[in-house]
Amino acid sequence: MELLSIVFEQVVLMLSLMMAGWIAYHKKLVKDEGIQQISNVLLYIVTPLTIINAYQIPFDVYKLQELGITLCLALIAMVFMIIITKLCFPTLDGIGQFGLCFPNCGFMGIPLIKAILGDEAVFYLSAYMVIFNLLAWTYGIYMVTRDRQYLSLKKGLLNPGTISVILGLVLFISPIKIPPLLFRGMESLANMNTPLAMIILGCYIAKMPWKKLLLNIKIYQLSLLRLVIFPLCIGILLMIVPEKYHIIKMTVYIASCAPAAVNTMIFAIQFQGNKDMGASFVSLSSLLSLLSMPLIISLSSWLWS
């Protein structure tokens, strides 16, 4: 019950921040151009700093080993979702497939994991985000475009998420650390991650026609898979992981419980995919996740007992 209470409180906080974005968009305090600009600040500055800050801890070989374990578990989880989607839903639109396979592990994962497991767990989440970025910017774009030119390791490596993890890892391994004054400034910017992410999400939800969003049965079906079925399958897979790696298990599990990644909508726009499905899937799954995530995350104690 304590875990359920923590998750519920965090989700209510996130909902209040989303409401701020919803109101700001409806009152025209933020326009479409402003949403894109705030998204750029989050994507290229705030989220990378959040990851880099998580690596500002004394070097520990054991932690490096745990990071490698997280990397392997994240890869297993992501590949599992891709294979199940490919086998069970081969005719599904590419944007729908992408949304099923790729959870919003950054925007939704970071605030929840920080609240439930502490700042230390963001260190492990960064490994999940490496796998996410490598697959999303290669096979994920291929899902949407069916163009094999995107199956390139270079495209998977040259993105803000992966680059920030590499920089953070270098700082973690080396004796060089960020000076305290500079670190405090970076920490202040990193603390903006949750408010900015939720405000952006609230703005995107405000843009969606409510009738079109709420009456789309197919999006409810996809959201059920993304928010309930896939996370429970990942939870069952994680049962084989020893309990001494509890924080790692929970990090991978919580990241897998997140709604469809915002990239679902971004890639639909950027690569001429199904824009309506992308926006609807991200918006509705994000709203429904406010109900599903407290329950599904709390089930972990029952699954692994």
Image: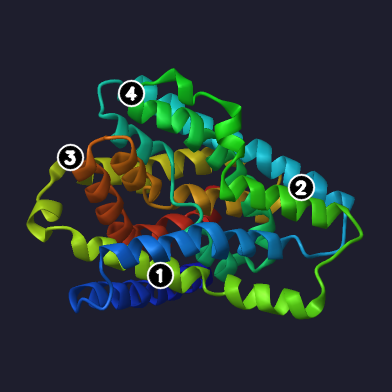
In the rendered structure, which disc, 4 or 1, sits on the residue that comes first in sequence? 1
Name the disc covering residue 218, or none.
Answer: 3
Q: Which residue is mark 1?
A: 11
In the rendered structure, which disc, 3 or 1, sits on the residue that comes first in sequence? 1
Check disc 2 and give the amino acid type.
Glu
Q: Residue at x 53, y 41 (%)?
A: 132
Residue 44 horizontal side relative to residue 270, left or right: right
Res. 248 visible in picture: no
Residue 4 horizontal side relative to residue 191, left or right: left
141, 249: nearer the viewer: 141
Q: Which residue is mark 4?
A: 88
Q: Are marks 3 and 4 in contact (CB under 8 Å)?
A: no
Mark 1: few, some, or many residues within 10 Å (few <14, many ≥20)?
A: many
Q: Residue at x 55, y 25 (%)?
A: 152
Check disc 4 and give the amino acid type.
Cys
* Distance in Å between CA atoms under marks 4 and 1: 31 Å
